[in-house]
Amino acid sequence: MAETYALRVQIESHEYDGEFYLIGDGYGTPADVLDNVAADHLLRIANAKHIEEYLLNVLKHGENTGEAEYEATDSDVECWIHVDVSYQRYAFGGGDRVFEFSSEPSKSEIASTVTQLRS
């Protein structure tokens, strides 16, 4: 049976303040979730001209799930992303660990964080 992850994405900006949820299988550690799922979202948020562009893309591709399903899911690992768009602050959390990124996270910075999580 595949390991289930749950990822909560919290976004604060002048235009949007809220969160949405992602659930999936195949990743059973925070490092795996960051490496294979959360990194993509962090980079897409950082590279979007406007946060609405990112949010519409997520909705368009049906990546998100509802809060009720998120709460009801018996996940093996729970992680979160927090982004404050106005102040360009990015963070990832999994288990009892929290990692803050530079004003715009890069692939190399994310890869370094994945390595730290695995150690």
Image: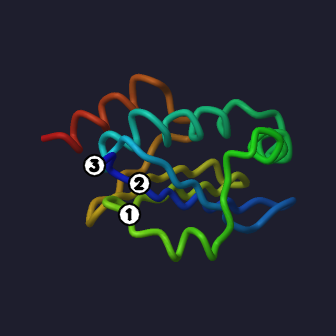
* Label 1 neighbour load within 10 Å: few <14, some 14-19, many 20+: some
Point out the tag, 3 or 2, that comes first from the N-terminus: 2
Q: Residue furthest left?
A: 119
Compared across the picture, whether 62 is left or right of 84 comes to right
Residue hosting label 1:
75
Return the x and y of residue 15 as percentages of the image width and height.
Answer: 87, 59
Classed neighbour count for the residue bearing mark 2: other residues with Cα under 10 Å, few (<14), some (14–19), many (≥20): many
Secondary structure of residue under mark 3: loop
Q: Under tag 2, what secondary structure?
A: strand
* Residue in view at x 35 percent, y 43 percent: 27
Q: Earlier in the sequence, mark 1 or mark 3?
A: 3
Q: Which mark is residue 67?
A: none
Quarter assignment of residue 34: top left
Picture coordinates of residue 19, whole percent (x, y):
67, 65
In the image shown, does 19 or 5 lie closer to the viewer?
5
When the figure is inspected, residue 84 is found, relative to residue 101, above or below; the finding is: below
Whole-angstrom CA distance, mark 3 to mark 2, is: 8 Å
Closer-to-camera residue (105/24): 24
Query: Marks 2 and 1: CB-CB under 8 Å?
Result: yes
Of the numbered discs 2 and 1, the one sitting upstream in the chain is 2
- Tell me: 2 left or right of 89: left
| Residue displayed at 61% across by 60% down | 21
Pointer 3 with pointer 2, Cβ within 8 A: no
Q: CA distance from mark 2 to mark 1?
A: 5 Å
